[in-house]
Image (spheres, rainbow, N blue to C red):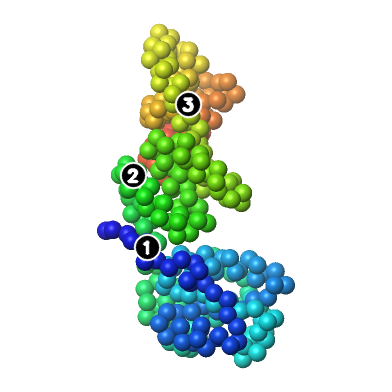
Protein backbone atom coordinates (compact mmCIF):
# COMPACT_ATOMS: atom_id res chain seq x y z
CA UNK A 1 0.00 0.00 0.00
CA UNK A 2 1.34 3.41 -0.96
CA UNK A 3 0.92 6.25 1.51
CA UNK A 4 0.34 9.72 0.09
CA UNK A 5 0.57 12.34 2.82
CA UNK A 6 0.31 15.17 0.31
CA UNK A 7 -3.46 14.98 0.69
CA UNK A 8 -3.35 15.23 4.47
CA UNK A 9 -4.31 18.65 5.76
CA UNK A 10 -1.76 20.58 7.76
CA UNK A 11 -2.56 21.95 11.21
CA UNK A 12 -3.37 25.39 9.80
CA UNK A 13 -6.17 23.88 7.68
CA UNK A 14 -7.58 21.84 10.55
CA UNK A 15 -7.32 24.29 13.44
CA UNK A 16 -8.59 27.86 13.52
CA UNK A 17 -9.66 30.59 15.89
CA UNK A 18 -13.21 31.82 15.53
CA UNK A 19 -15.68 34.19 17.16
CA UNK A 20 -19.38 34.80 17.64
CA UNK A 21 -19.81 36.17 14.11
CA UNK A 22 -18.02 33.23 12.51
CA UNK A 23 -19.54 30.47 14.62
CA UNK A 24 -22.29 29.55 12.17
CA UNK A 25 -19.93 29.18 9.21
CA UNK A 26 -16.90 27.75 11.05
CA UNK A 27 -18.81 25.28 13.22
CA UNK A 28 -22.42 24.64 12.17
CA UNK A 29 -21.96 24.79 8.40
CA UNK A 30 -18.51 23.17 8.45
CA UNK A 31 -19.78 20.27 10.56
CA UNK A 32 -22.16 19.30 7.76
CA UNK A 33 -19.09 17.95 5.94
CA UNK A 34 -16.54 17.23 8.70
CA UNK A 35 -17.09 16.90 12.48
CA UNK A 36 -15.94 20.05 14.30
CA UNK A 37 -14.63 20.19 17.86
CA UNK A 38 -15.06 23.55 19.61
CA UNK A 39 -12.67 24.43 22.43
CA UNK A 40 -13.91 27.26 24.68
CA UNK A 41 -10.94 28.75 26.51
CA UNK A 42 -9.46 31.95 27.98
CA UNK A 43 -5.90 33.24 28.39
CA UNK A 44 -6.16 33.19 32.21
CA UNK A 45 -7.31 29.53 32.35
CA UNK A 46 -4.49 27.26 33.55
CA UNK A 47 -6.05 23.90 32.52
CA UNK A 48 -6.76 25.39 29.07
CA UNK A 49 -3.01 25.72 28.52
CA UNK A 50 -2.64 21.97 29.03
CA UNK A 51 -5.74 20.85 27.19
CA UNK A 52 -5.33 23.08 24.13
CA UNK A 53 -2.06 21.62 22.80
CA UNK A 54 -3.25 18.08 23.54
CA UNK A 55 -6.44 18.56 21.51
CA UNK A 56 -4.42 20.08 18.68
CA UNK A 57 -2.12 17.04 18.57
CA UNK A 58 -5.06 14.63 18.47
CA UNK A 59 -6.78 16.64 15.74
CA UNK A 60 -3.58 16.83 13.68
CA UNK A 61 -3.06 13.09 14.04
CA UNK A 62 -6.64 12.46 12.90
CA UNK A 63 -5.40 13.77 9.55
CA UNK A 64 -8.49 15.64 8.41
CA UNK A 65 -11.15 13.40 9.93
CA UNK A 66 -12.09 16.21 12.35
CA UNK A 67 -11.48 19.95 12.65
CA UNK A 68 -10.87 22.16 15.68
CA UNK A 69 -12.28 25.63 16.32
CA UNK A 70 -10.98 27.62 19.31
CA UNK A 71 -13.08 30.36 20.89
CA UNK A 72 -11.82 32.80 23.54
CA UNK A 73 -14.79 33.33 25.88
CA UNK A 74 -13.41 36.68 27.09
CA UNK A 75 -13.67 38.01 23.57
CA UNK A 76 -16.89 36.17 22.71
CA UNK A 77 -19.11 35.97 25.79
CA UNK A 78 -22.33 35.84 23.72
CA UNK A 79 -21.63 32.47 22.09
CA UNK A 80 -20.36 31.08 25.39
CA UNK A 81 -23.66 32.06 26.99
CA UNK A 82 -25.66 30.54 24.15
CA UNK A 83 -23.75 27.27 24.61
CA UNK A 84 -24.30 27.52 28.39
CA UNK A 85 -20.60 27.36 29.11
CA UNK A 86 -20.30 27.66 32.89
CA UNK A 87 -16.64 26.70 33.35
CA UNK A 88 -13.64 26.20 31.12
CA UNK A 89 -12.06 24.46 29.41
CA UNK A 90 -15.30 23.33 27.83
CA UNK A 91 -15.28 21.24 24.66
CA UNK A 92 -18.22 20.52 22.35
CA UNK A 93 -18.29 18.36 19.24
CA UNK A 94 -20.59 19.13 16.30
CA UNK A 95 -21.61 16.85 13.44
CA UNK A 96 -24.33 17.48 10.91
CA UNK A 97 -24.86 20.99 12.26
CA UNK A 98 -25.70 19.92 15.82
CA UNK A 99 -23.81 19.12 19.04
CA UNK A 100 -23.17 15.38 19.50
CA UNK A 101 -20.77 15.16 22.48
CA UNK A 102 -18.70 17.22 24.87
CA UNK A 103 -16.75 17.42 28.12
CA UNK A 104 -15.60 19.97 30.68
CA UNK A 105 -12.11 20.20 32.22
CA UNK A 106 -8.69 19.00 31.13
CA UNK A 107 -8.38 15.37 30.02
CA UNK A 108 -5.27 13.29 29.26
CA UNK A 109 -4.45 12.86 25.59
CA UNK A 110 -5.58 9.21 25.54
CA UNK A 111 -9.07 10.22 26.68
CA UNK A 112 -9.18 13.05 24.14
CA UNK A 113 -8.44 10.51 21.42
CA UNK A 114 -11.28 8.31 22.72
CA UNK A 115 -13.55 11.36 22.63
CA UNK A 116 -12.61 12.04 19.01
CA UNK A 117 -13.26 8.39 18.15
CA UNK A 118 -16.75 8.68 19.67
CA UNK A 119 -17.38 11.83 17.67
CA UNK A 120 -16.34 10.08 14.46
CA UNK A 121 -18.64 7.18 15.22
CA UNK A 122 -21.51 9.57 15.91
CA UNK A 123 -20.82 11.18 12.55
CA UNK A 124 -20.76 7.81 10.82
CA UNK A 125 -16.98 7.67 10.37
CA UNK A 126 -14.38 5.07 11.23
CA UNK A 127 -12.34 5.92 14.36
CA UNK A 128 -8.61 5.39 14.34
CA UNK A 129 -8.38 4.81 10.58
CA UNK A 130 -6.35 7.60 8.99
CA UNK A 131 -3.35 8.10 6.69
CA UNK A 132 -1.04 8.98 9.58
CA UNK A 133 -1.60 5.64 11.32
CA UNK A 134 -1.20 3.84 8.00
CA UNK A 135 2.04 5.70 7.28
CA UNK A 136 3.52 4.76 10.65
CA UNK A 137 2.58 1.13 10.11
CA UNK A 138 4.24 1.10 6.69
CA UNK A 139 7.37 2.86 7.99
CA UNK A 140 7.71 0.41 10.89
CA UNK A 141 7.21 -2.56 8.56
CA UNK A 142 9.88 -1.24 6.19
CA UNK A 143 12.33 -0.72 9.07
CA UNK A 144 11.70 -4.23 10.39
CA UNK A 145 12.39 -5.58 6.90
CA UNK A 146 15.66 -3.64 6.77
CA UNK A 147 14.47 -1.24 4.07
CA UNK A 148 15.61 1.92 5.82
CA UNK A 149 15.50 3.93 2.59
CA UNK A 150 11.74 3.43 2.37
CA UNK A 151 11.25 3.83 6.11
CA UNK A 152 13.24 7.06 6.15
CA UNK A 153 11.25 8.50 3.26
CA UNK A 154 7.94 7.87 5.03
CA UNK A 155 9.20 9.17 8.38
CA UNK A 156 10.46 12.29 6.63
CA UNK A 157 6.96 12.94 5.24
CA UNK A 158 5.52 12.43 8.70
CA UNK A 159 7.97 14.95 10.17
CA UNK A 160 7.06 17.47 7.47
CA UNK A 161 3.38 16.97 8.31
CA UNK A 162 3.90 17.30 12.08
CA UNK A 163 7.38 18.43 13.22
CA UNK A 164 6.34 17.93 16.83
CA UNK A 165 5.66 14.20 16.46
CA UNK A 166 8.70 12.75 18.23
CA UNK A 167 7.95 9.22 17.07
CA UNK A 168 8.34 10.41 13.49
CA UNK A 169 11.41 12.52 14.35
CA UNK A 170 13.11 9.57 16.02
CA UNK A 171 12.17 7.22 13.19
CA UNK A 172 13.65 9.50 10.54
CA UNK A 173 16.87 10.06 12.52
CA UNK A 174 17.28 6.33 13.16
CA UNK A 175 16.77 5.58 9.46
CA UNK A 176 19.62 7.97 8.66
CA UNK A 177 21.86 6.18 11.16
CA UNK A 178 21.00 2.79 9.69
CA UNK A 179 21.78 4.15 6.21
CA UNK A 180 25.25 5.10 7.53
CA UNK A 181 24.42 8.80 7.33
CA UNK A 182 25.32 9.54 10.93
CA UNK A 183 26.50 13.06 10.15
CA UNK A 184 23.15 13.89 8.53
CA UNK A 185 21.36 12.44 11.57
CA UNK A 186 23.49 14.59 13.90
CA UNK A 187 22.70 17.71 11.87
CA UNK A 188 18.99 16.88 11.83
CA UNK A 189 18.90 16.43 15.61
CA UNK A 190 20.92 19.60 16.18
CA UNK A 191 18.24 21.61 14.37
CA UNK A 192 15.44 20.42 16.66
CA UNK A 193 13.99 23.03 19.04
CA UNK A 194 15.36 22.95 22.61
CA UNK A 195 12.23 21.37 24.07
CA UNK A 196 12.65 18.34 21.79
CA UNK A 197 16.37 17.75 22.35
CA UNK A 198 15.93 15.55 25.43
CA UNK A 199 12.78 13.73 24.32
CA UNK A 200 12.83 10.09 25.50
CA UNK A 201 11.99 8.92 21.95
CA UNK A 202 15.50 10.01 20.90
CA UNK A 203 17.36 7.85 23.44
CA UNK A 204 17.76 4.95 21.00
CA UNK A 205 18.95 7.28 18.24
CA UNK A 206 21.60 8.89 20.42
CA UNK A 207 22.81 5.48 21.60
CA UNK A 208 23.03 4.31 17.98
CA UNK A 209 24.96 7.46 17.03
CA UNK A 210 27.40 6.89 19.87
CA UNK A 211 28.06 3.37 18.64
CA UNK A 212 28.31 4.52 15.02
CA UNK A 213 30.97 7.07 16.00
CA UNK A 214 33.18 4.20 17.12
CA UNK A 215 32.78 2.23 13.89
CA UNK A 216 35.86 3.46 11.98
CA UNK A 217 38.30 2.73 14.78
CA UNK A 218 36.51 -0.52 15.57
CA UNK A 219 36.98 -1.88 12.05
CA UNK A 220 40.72 -1.35 12.24
CA UNK A 221 40.98 -3.02 15.64
CA UNK A 222 38.56 -5.92 15.12
CA UNK A 223 40.98 -8.57 13.83
CA UNK A 224 43.58 -7.85 16.49
CA UNK A 225 41.01 -8.00 19.29
CA UNK A 226 39.62 -11.29 18.00
CA UNK A 227 43.13 -12.76 17.99
CA UNK A 228 43.70 -11.49 21.53
CA UNK A 229 40.57 -13.18 22.85
CA UNK A 230 41.50 -16.45 21.13
CA UNK A 231 44.97 -16.36 22.70
CA UNK A 232 43.63 -15.64 26.17
CA UNK A 233 39.92 -16.31 26.76
CA UNK A 234 40.31 -15.01 30.32
CA UNK A 235 41.38 -11.55 29.16
CA UNK A 236 38.14 -9.76 30.01
CA UNK A 237 39.40 -6.37 28.86
CA UNK A 238 40.14 -7.76 25.39
CA UNK A 239 36.75 -9.47 25.32
CA UNK A 240 35.05 -6.23 26.35
CA UNK A 241 36.94 -4.18 23.74
CA UNK A 242 35.97 -6.75 21.11
CA UNK A 243 32.29 -6.52 22.10
CA UNK A 244 32.39 -2.72 21.89
CA UNK A 245 33.95 -2.95 18.43
CA UNK A 246 31.40 -5.51 17.31
CA UNK A 247 28.47 -3.40 18.48
CA UNK A 248 29.91 -0.36 16.70
CA UNK A 249 30.04 -2.39 13.49
CA UNK A 250 26.51 -3.72 13.87
CA UNK A 251 27.61 -7.21 14.90
CA UNK A 252 25.20 -6.98 17.78
CA UNK A 253 24.52 -10.66 18.37
CA UNK A 254 28.25 -11.37 18.80
CA UNK A 255 28.62 -8.29 21.00
CA UNK A 256 25.76 -9.37 23.28
CA UNK A 257 27.19 -12.89 23.55
CA UNK A 258 30.61 -11.52 24.47
CA UNK A 259 29.31 -9.11 27.09
CA UNK A 260 27.19 -11.80 28.72
CA UNK A 261 30.24 -14.09 28.80
CA UNK A 262 32.14 -11.41 30.71
CA UNK A 263 29.33 -11.21 33.25
CA UNK A 264 29.27 -14.99 33.60
CA UNK A 265 32.99 -14.94 34.43
CA UNK A 266 32.89 -11.81 36.63
CA UNK A 267 29.56 -10.07 37.00
CA UNK A 268 30.92 -6.84 38.50
CA UNK A 269 34.07 -6.61 36.38
CA UNK A 270 35.38 -3.09 35.87
CA UNK A 271 32.55 -1.42 37.79
CA UNK A 272 29.76 -3.20 35.90
CA UNK A 273 31.14 -2.18 32.50
CA UNK A 274 29.76 -5.20 30.62
CA UNK A 275 26.19 -4.68 31.86
CA UNK A 276 26.31 -0.95 31.09
CA UNK A 277 27.54 -1.64 27.56
CA UNK A 278 24.79 -4.24 27.13
CA UNK A 279 22.18 -1.65 28.07
CA UNK A 280 23.66 0.74 25.52
CA UNK A 281 23.39 -1.94 22.81
CA UNK A 282 19.78 -2.69 23.81
CA UNK A 283 18.98 1.04 23.72
CA UNK A 284 20.42 1.39 20.22
CA UNK A 285 18.53 -1.66 18.94
CA UNK A 286 15.23 -0.59 20.48
CA UNK A 287 13.01 -2.48 22.93
CA UNK A 288 11.19 -4.63 20.36
CA UNK A 289 14.24 -5.91 18.47
CA UNK A 290 14.48 -9.72 18.86
CA UNK A 291 18.11 -9.40 19.99
CA UNK A 292 17.06 -6.96 22.71
CA UNK A 293 14.23 -9.20 23.87
CA UNK A 294 16.36 -12.34 24.02
CA UNK A 295 19.37 -10.46 25.41
CA UNK A 296 17.37 -8.91 28.22
CA UNK A 297 15.93 -12.30 29.08
CA UNK A 298 19.42 -13.81 29.28
CA UNK A 299 20.65 -10.84 31.32
CA UNK A 300 17.79 -11.20 33.81
CA UNK A 301 18.46 -14.92 34.18
CA UNK A 302 22.11 -14.17 34.86
CA UNK A 303 21.41 -11.39 37.36
CA UNK A 304 18.79 -13.28 39.32
CA UNK A 305 20.24 -16.78 39.17
**Percent coordinates x, y for residue 33 in the rendering:** 40, 82
Q: Classify mark 2: helix, strand or loop.
A: helix
Find residue 298 and report its image quarter: top left
Above or below 106: residue 150 = above
Which residue does the image show at 65% across and 89% down from the upper left?
A: 78
Give the quarter of the figure containing the N terminus.
bottom left
**Percent coordinates x, y for residue 16 in the rendering:** 54, 74
Q: Which residue is identified by label 1?
A: 6
Which residue does the image show at 47% across and 71% down from the upper left?
A: 13
Q: Residue furthest bottom?
A: 82
Dot 3 or dot 2: first in sequence order is 2
Q: Which residue is identified by label 2?
A: 149
Front-lying residue, 8 or 59: 8
Q: Is residue 175 visible?
A: yes
**What is the crowding at mark 1: few (fewer than 14 residues within 10 Å), some, or many (at least 20)?**
few
Which label sits in the foreground, 1 or 2?
A: 1
How far apart marks 3 and 2 lie (CA) works out to: 23 Å
Which residue does the image show at 34% across and 44% down from the upper left?
A: 149
Front-lying residue, 208 or 276: 208
Front-lying residue, 257 or 9: 9
How far apart marks 1 and 2 lie (CA) works out to: 19 Å
Q: Residue furthest left?
A: 1
Above or below 225: residue 61 = below
Q: Classify mark 3: helix, strand or loop.
A: loop
Q: Classify mark 1: helix, strand or loop.
A: helix
Dot 1 or dot 2: first in sequence order is 1
Which residue does the image show at 55% across and 21% down from the upper left?
A: 269
Amino acid sequence: MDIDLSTVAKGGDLIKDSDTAGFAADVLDASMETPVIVDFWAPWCGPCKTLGPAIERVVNNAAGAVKLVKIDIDQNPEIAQQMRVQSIPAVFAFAGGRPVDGFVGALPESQIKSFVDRVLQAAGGAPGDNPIDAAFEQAEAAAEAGDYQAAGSIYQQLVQHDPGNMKAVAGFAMALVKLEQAEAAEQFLAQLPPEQQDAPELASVRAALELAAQAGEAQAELAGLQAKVIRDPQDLQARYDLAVAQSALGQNEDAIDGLLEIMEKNRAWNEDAARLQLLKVFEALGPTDPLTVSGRRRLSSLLFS
